Amino acid sequence: MNSGNATHSSDPGCWDERYSAAKDWFFGRDPSELGRLTLHFWRMIRGAQGGRLLDLGCGEGRDSVYFAANGFQVTAIDLAQAGVRKALRLAGECGVALDDLRCADVRTAPLEDGFDVVFSGNCIQALGGECPQFLSRIQASTPVDGFNAIRVATSETDAFADRPGLYRFAPRELLADYEGWRILYYSEDLLYVPHAGGLASFAGVIAQKAR
């Protein structure tokens, strides 16, 4: 599993540079494991129908394009301009349309619209102390039977300890945040992340809001 789509830092400039400098796509064009698993569980429960999906911190668009290609109406948001440009390019190359692609802070996302799926691969930790409250907003906005698919950095390693403004989840904190939801998938893992210079720790959850 790779580390995700988006920023581990509150500074979007570093990701603009990385996305611009990459000869191809920094994280590749294929969907993340979290993206593939989210679609897998959606198909198991909801069948072939699509839905409205919000991708927070879409990076270069690999998951947004994947969901669009599988019948979802996608709103995708990222603060890195180079990422948004490459997401648009990837959508064109794959012959799909992203319904709403925005270069913006994820805090401006239209959560009140009640998306069927809110997806975020390694983004919301960049909100620092606002991260727990923002996650609560995501959960509150999700309709009954809707999905959240969230991946975040954790404090198990010190890989990001020197990054100012980064919220690192404690072990099993993300799982506890989804108490009362139907947990479809949960993981905590250690990965070698080249741009972090060593091992980094992450947690991921796919959960369905209970009635």
Image (spheres, rainbow, N blue to C red):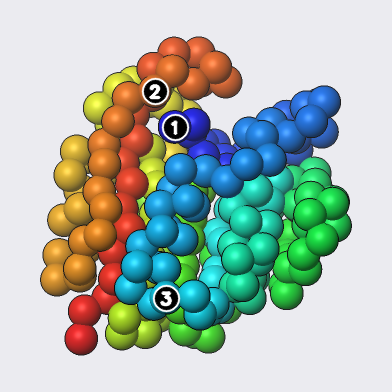
x and y, in percent, of residue 55 in the image = 56, 62
How far apart marks 3 and 2 lie (CA) works out to 32 Å
Q: Are marks 1 and 3 in contact (CB under 8 Å)?
A: no
Q: Secondary structure at mark 3?
A: loop
Give the residue at x 19% y 38%.
171
Q: CA distance from mark 1 to mark 3?
A: 26 Å
Q: Residue 191: horizontal and vertical position, in percent?
A: 39, 23
Q: Which residue is mark 3?
A: 47
Percent position of residue 142, x then y: 38, 79
The earlier-in-sequence mark between 1 and 3 is 1
Q: Quadrant of the C terminus?
A: bottom left
Question: Compared with residue 62, is residue 134 higher up or lower down, i.e. above or below?
Answer: below
On the question of residue 31 being in view, the answer is: yes
Q: Is residue 21 left or right of residue 140?
A: right
- Please say whether residue 10 is visible from this viewpoint: no
Residue type highlighted by circle 2: Leu
Residue where numbered disc 2 is placed: 191
Q: Residues within 10 Å of mark 1 (few under 14, many from 20)?
A: few
SS of the residue under disc 1: loop
Q: Is residue 98 above or below residue 21?
A: below
**Identity, as a three-letter code, of the amino acid under mark 3:** Gly
Q: Which residue is mark 1?
A: 1
Which comes sooner in the sequence, label 3 or label 2?
3
Say if mark 2 contacts mark 1, CB within 8 Å. Answer: yes
Pick whichever of labels 2 and 1 is earlier in the sequence: 1
- Please, what is the three-letter code of the amino acid marked with disc 1? Met
User: Looking at the image, which residue is at 22% across and 40% down?
Assistant: 170
